[in-house]
Image (spheres, helix red, strand yellow):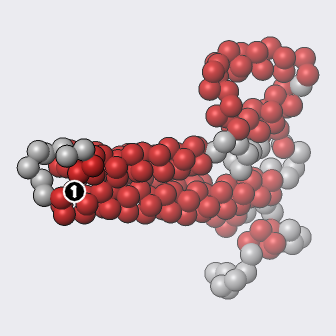
Amino acid sequence: MEAIGQDPIEDAHTPNNSGSSPEVLAVYQVLANRAQANRNLTWQIPALTLTSQAFLIGISAQLQVHWVIRLTLSLTILAIGAVSLFLQLKVGVYTILDLHMLDKYERLILNDGHSDYLLHHSKTTLGREREFLKQLGHKHAGHYMRVLDKYWGAVRPLRLLPLNITWGMLQVIISIAGGAIPLLPLLFR
């Protein structure tokens, strides 16, 4: 049993331990599972946020809603958007930390010359593509880059941004627009 605060990665470099020890592999599996759970949250947070905001906008679309209720709905829509944005950022930070740790553990596990099998978890989509193309060598890289460019098409610039940043920007726009919708009948009486 390891003491609290002891780093299994540092211990793996001692002569009596290898990178593929059961402890290192167990920690790698836990990190991989947690990173996957965080990726799932990355998609669930915006989906549930948009659903709740759409429900509140639907309530505000009723013709006989008092102005106090409209104002409350508007503020609630904005608050849901803000909470969602902060939650997305928090999950994004933890995901990035886990992905960097996964890369560190993979380098440790594959320290015997199999670095071609690294998955480059912590890189963006574009960075991961470049790493895999480097592994293929220059002979095939041009062909695969043309295939990837054709696949990405007009959304190619989105490869440069992490998805949580893209969703965060959209969430701000949707929250402001959604917060304004309940107030429109009050403005145009």
Please provide percent x and percent y for residue 137. Answer: 89, 25
43 displayed left or right of 52? right
159 to 65, vertically: above or below = above
Please provide percent x and percent y for residue 65. Answer: 12, 53
Quarter of the figure with residue 140: top right
Which amino acid type corresponds to the residue marked 1 in the rendered image? Answer: Arg
Which residue is at a point 25% across and 63% down the rendered structure image?
72
| Nearest the eye: 186 or 160 | 186
Please provide percent x and percent y for residue 78. Answer: 38, 58
Tag 1: Cα neighbours inside 10 Å, few (<14), some, or many (≥20)? many
Do we see residue 89 in this rendering?
yes
| Nearest the eye: 16 or 94 | 94
Please provide percent x and percent y for residue 33. Answer: 54, 55
| Nearest the eye: 123 or 15 | 123
Which residue is at a point 62% across and 26% down the rendered structure image?
155
Quarter of the figure with residue 28: bottom right
Extreme residue toward the left, this view: 64
144 to 18, vertically: above or below = above
Extreme residue toward the front, this view: 189
46 displayed left or right of 184? right
Extreme residue toward the right, this view: 138
Quadrant of the drawing holding the N terminus:
bottom right
56 to 6, vertically: above or below = above
Which residue is at a point 84% across and 43% down the rendered structure image?
115
- In what element is the residue under mark 1? helix
Do we see residue 51 in this rendering?
no
Would you name the residue on which mark 1 appears? 70
